[in-house]
Image: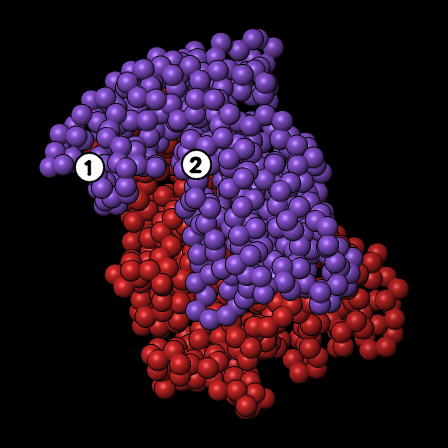
Chain colours: A purple, B red
């Protein structure tokens, strides 16, 4: 069957020689949202530009015209092109970057490759993403030895970056004191005291460090935390899920985390199903197997292992049948963002809007932004909702009530008001996290404020009336 | 709620809709074209491409591609509504549709990206101890045996050991069963000091008390192997394993949409998995993982671990156990279209005539096609009886067979021949069928699909004649002459299975 010839619909192509429309509502034509949907929640699931949707659907036909030629021969070159572009973007070597399905998959790849021993410690935060924390919980839940122990740093925002670093350093030292009988001699290659001899390595500490947390959506001083961890001989897994396409100037060769991951399908506007996993050469021996284990696994002791070690890059080339289009449309993604003005222009607009929009939203709701200083905010402002704040946890909002309120807000925002921003309970109060994207304007924040005003009144009248 | 949602999406944004091209929709009230080349109309395969290799990557029908592309617009018209609300009920529909096809309950079935992923989910959830055994086979799929190898490669305890059954086809089902049973008994004898008391719930001697469970044996059993593509007597093997107290993980990657009469509630394997994006025509990125309720306590975590993970040390565990189904609902942001368009694939197959009609056509074509191809090449089919054939058949290629490994074909030569075949088939002759070296001989594996007919097999046979001649003239030149001087041409003889062992991890330089 000849490939069906579809013509691109409105917004699915653009003339790269012509200037783009200005940032703001004029750009909505390049996204698939229903006309009346005011989307202030790009951060959760991303937003695909129509040209990327179009490129993916056309690629699907190309793949199907001969799946064997594609998968056996053409795929690898295209995959490497995407890896190259993403590696360059984060200042890493191409061979330190592989693509996986999403940030959670990347995180699981790292965590499940460590051979955990009794005495090992994993340090999380109260703001660690739920499925990341659950992965460590699962490892610690093994019904018998060996299993790591988990420690959690409490972050109650607002905090300054200096405060965050202090809390982080304190926790690492506290862990060592609490376990002074354990020899944490399995330190990362970049730390002092690293030894090659396997018999000298007893136990290890791994810290999961968010680059940008989810709830609240705040920028963390992750490069400084990585440095502190390195000094302390602690492994760092940096969860940068929200970072690429939002955080400017990510330089992994400089920051030197032990492991780093980010979703291409969030702020970079990629197609859902693509994340990057960065493992510097010095640490690739730790990643014994892709997850799932696939065709190119290299067993220690074989000739193949002698030649290429764990074969980090080849292991991740093909993890079984899947839709590879998210990996392969990365060039189109970059091209579109380049046309819009490039990373600096995009993030310049979005970060300015985040501040202005957050301020306006706080005005409309007569509340406050979480981050007065601006230190914690890139493209996601967090603003308090007009609901009472409790001084002790559970005083006003027991856990079941928090869930009820959140479900109520979700439903009403999406269906009655046709808008959305993430909302969550933090430190006694309710907050919303907005995402300022290239298709948003300040009026979107005003509208959201009106919606929250009405809805929070309803919450007080119904859920909280007995209080 | 669902009706409201549908209405919401059927709204005014028609500029986002794509109009279906030829082959992307069909009138369910009209009869479909007959099986064979007329059905190529509904597939995106290039018209001139003779595809006898559906089995490797699947072939997605145009109506499924179209539905997925349409769904992409729907999802992005409001990603929050889709991911937070609309997605789950639609996932349930897909799971129910698949469960029905395999005789399982919906709550025993979850969807994952592919068979390798499903297999890893199962094997990585077992808590391995020193002394545990995993039984694989020489015909186990590469990624699967690698997964087992990875588990045994842990640099320090605890780690299981691996045993491998050697299957040199052709074998009858009776022979396979014997080899399987013998391996289990050998394993127990060789490890007579180990107490294999951690048996599956349905086996004799099962005890719920964890303190009584020492070690276990887990057998990974193909229902249909890849190379060669043959149907194994897996149901009987399940029964034997159950008698012997051995856990069964059935790698049925090729089964759904190919194998008939799958009834898991009857056969009762401990775990079963299959790719919907192979013979069931689903979009790539969808496989089914089956874990009966009695075994869901073993499936502690999805891979990756998700929001719905339930700790056995928490209070929720008493209520929902491991929360198997909910754990697999959402494992991070992804493109859900492969899962959600499974009913579209099943409906298309219904329209074509239904599972039975599809099987009847494809099975007959696999048998007849293989015979015709063997005629054209002057060789034989691997399986005369048909016992091993569902809708894939295997035919010997016109190349010399060797009686001892390495006699004619070193690993480098094998790789060279494979490479030459792949390139010639795809680029010069615009066709493909699987080809591999097994038990001393070169074999082709052909997939008989609804868009194939016997002329495809004839064509591929003729093509292989030319290619194999070239192989003999170039790569095998010196070696071939030497062989002929020593023992005469042996192309037409099937190899004898007891003569040698094919090692699973020949390091082929590529």
Q: Is residue B24 above or below residue A35?
A: below
**Residue A347: which disc?**
none
Where on the picture, by quarter, is residue B410? bottom right
Q: How many marks?
A: 2
The residue lying at 63 percent from left, 59 percent from top is: A184
- Number of residues whose C-alpha sits closer than 10 Å to that of mark 1, classed few (under 14), some (14–19) or many (20 or more): few
* Chain ID at mark 2: A
Query: What element does badge 1 sit on?
Result: loop
Residue B306 at x, y percent in the picture: 41, 50
**Residue A214: which disc?**
2
Residue A326 relative to residue B318: left or right? right
Residue A29 relative to residue A165: left or right? left
Q: Is residue B293 visible?
A: yes
Q: Nearer the viewer, residue B125 or A426?
A: A426
**Residue B1: which disc?**
1
* Chain ID at mark 1: B
The residue lying at 23 percent from left, 36 percent from top is: A405
- Number of residues whose C-alpha sits closer than 10 Å to that of mark 2, classed few (under 14), some (14–19) or many (20 or more): many
Q: Quadrant of the C terminus of chain A?
A: top left
The residue lying at 36 percent from left, 86 percent from top is: B205
Q: CA distance from mark 1 to mark 2?
A: 29 Å
Residue B108 at x, y percent in the picture: 32, 61
The residue lying at 44 percent from left, 19 percent from top is: A354
């Amino acid at each position: 069957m000849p490939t069906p010839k579809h013509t691109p619909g409105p917004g699915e192509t653009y003339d790269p020689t012509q200037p783009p429309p200005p940032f703001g509502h004029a750009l909505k034509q390049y996204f698939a949202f229903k006309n009346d949907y005011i989307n202030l929640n790009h951060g959760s699931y991303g937003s695909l530009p129509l040209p990327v949707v179009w490129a993916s659907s056309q690629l699907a036909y190309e793949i199907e015209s001969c799946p064997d030629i594609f998968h056996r021969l053409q795929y690898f070159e295209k995959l490497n092109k995407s890896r190259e572009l993403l590696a360059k973007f984060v200042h890493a070597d191409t061979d330190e970057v592989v693509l996986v399905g999403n940030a959670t998959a990347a995180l699981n790849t790292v965590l499940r490759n460590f051979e955990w021993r009794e005495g090992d410690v994993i340090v999380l935060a109260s703001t660690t993403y739920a499925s990341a924390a659950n992965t460590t919980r699962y490892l610690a839940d093994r019904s018998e030895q060996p299993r790591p122990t988990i420690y959690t740093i409490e972050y109650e925002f607002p905090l300054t970056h200096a405060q965050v670093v202090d809390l982080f350093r304190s926790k690492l030292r506290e862990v060592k004191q609490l376990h002074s009988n354990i020899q944490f001699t399995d330190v990362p290659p970049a730390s002092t005291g690293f030894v090659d001899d396997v018999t000298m390595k007893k136990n290890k500490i791994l810290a999961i460090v968010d680059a940008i947390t989810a709830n609240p959506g705040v920028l963390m001083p992750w490069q400084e935390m990585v440095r502190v961890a390195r000094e302390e001989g602690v492994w760092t897994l940096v969860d940068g899920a929200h970072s690429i396409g939002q955080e400017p100037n990510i330089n992994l060769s400089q920051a030197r985390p032990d492991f780093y991951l980010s979703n291409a399908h969030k702020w970079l506007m990629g197609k859902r199903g693509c994340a990057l996993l960065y493992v510097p050469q010095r640490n690739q021996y730790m990643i014994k197997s892709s997850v799932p284990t696939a065709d190119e696994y290299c067993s220690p002791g074989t000739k193949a292992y002698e030649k290429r070690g764990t074969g980090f890059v080849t292991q991740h080339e093909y993890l079984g049948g899947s839709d590879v289009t998210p990996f392969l449309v990365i060039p189109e993604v970059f091209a579109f963002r380049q046309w819009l003005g490039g990373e600096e222009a995009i993030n310049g607009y979005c970060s300015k809007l985040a501040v202005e929009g957050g301020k306006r939203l706080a005005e409309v709701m007569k509340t406050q932004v979480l981050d007065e200083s601006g230190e914690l905010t890139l493209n996601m402002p967090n603003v308090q909702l007009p609901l009472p704040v409790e001084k002790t946890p559970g005083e006003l909002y027991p856990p079941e009530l928090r869930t009820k309120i959140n479900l109520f807000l979700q439903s009403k925002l999406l269906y009655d008001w046709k808008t959305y921003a993430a909302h969550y309970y933090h430190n006694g109060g309710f907050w919303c996290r907005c995402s300022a994207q290239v298709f948003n304007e300040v009026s979107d924040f005003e509208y959201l404020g009106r919606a929250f005003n009405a809805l929070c009144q309803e919450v007080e009248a119904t859920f909280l009336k007995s209080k | 709620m669902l009706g409201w949602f549908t209405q919401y999406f059927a709204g005014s944004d028609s500029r986002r809709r794509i109009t279906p091209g030829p082959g992307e929709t069909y009138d369910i009230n009209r009869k479909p074209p007959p099986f064979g080349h007329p059905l190529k109309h509904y597939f995106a395969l290039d018209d001139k491409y003779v595809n006898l290799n559906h089995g490797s990557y699947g072939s997605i029908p145009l109506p499924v591609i179209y539905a997925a592309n349409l769904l992409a617009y729907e999802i992005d018209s409001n990603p929050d509504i889709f991911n937070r609300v609309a997605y789950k009920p639609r996932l349930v529909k897909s799971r129910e549709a698949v469960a029905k096809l395999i005789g399982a309950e919906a709550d025993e079935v979850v969807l994952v990206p592919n068979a390798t992923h499903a297999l890893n989910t199962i094997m990585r959830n077992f808590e391995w101890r020193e002394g545990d055994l995993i039984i694989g086979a020489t015909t186990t799929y590469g990624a699967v045996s690698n997964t087992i190898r990875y588990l045994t490669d842990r640099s320090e305890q605890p780690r299981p050991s691996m045993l491998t059954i050697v299957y040199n086809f052709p074998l009858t089902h009776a022979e396979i069963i014997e080899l399987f049973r013998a391996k289990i008994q050998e394993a127990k004898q060789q490890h007579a000091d180990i107490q294999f008391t951690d048996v599956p719930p349905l086996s004799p001697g099962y005890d719920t008390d964890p303190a009584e469970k020492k070690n276990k044996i887990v057998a990974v059993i193909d229902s249909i192997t890849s190379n060669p593509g043959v149907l194994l007597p897996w149901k009987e093997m399940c029964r034997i394993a159950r008698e012997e107290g051995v856990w069964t993980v059935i790698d049925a990657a090729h089964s759904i949409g190919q194998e008939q009469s799958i009834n898991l509630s009857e056969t009762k394997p401990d775990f079963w998995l299959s790719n919907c994006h192979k013979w069931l025509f689903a979009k790539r990125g969808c496989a089914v993982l089956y874990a009966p309720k009695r075994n869901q306590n073993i499936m502690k975590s999805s891979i990756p671990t998700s929001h719905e993970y339930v700790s056995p040390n928490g209070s929720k565990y008493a209520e929902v156990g491991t929360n198997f189904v909910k754990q697999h609902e959402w494992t991070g942001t992804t493109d859900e279209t492969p899962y959600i368009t499974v009913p579209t694939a099943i409906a298309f197959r219904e329209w074509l005539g239904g599972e039975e009609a599809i099987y009847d056509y494809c099975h007959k074509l696999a048998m007849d096609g293989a015979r015709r191809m063997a005629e054209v090449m002057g060789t034989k089919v691997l399986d005369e009886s048909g016992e091993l054939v569902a809708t894939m058949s295997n035919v010997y290629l016109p190349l010399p067979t060797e009686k001892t490994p390495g006699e004619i074909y070193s690993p480098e030569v094998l790789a060279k021949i494979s490479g030459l075949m792949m390139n010639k088939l795809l680029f010069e002759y615009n066709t493909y069928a699987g080809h591999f070296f097994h038990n001393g001989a070169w074999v082709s594996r052909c997939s008989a699909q609804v868009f194939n007919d016997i002329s495809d097999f004839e064509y591929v046979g003729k093509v292989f004649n030319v290619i194999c001649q070239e192989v003999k003239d170039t790569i095998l030149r010196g070696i071939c002459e030497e062989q002929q001087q020593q023992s005469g041409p042996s192309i037409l003889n099937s190899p004898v299975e007891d003569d040698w062992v094919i090692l699973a991890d020949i390091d082929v330089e590529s």
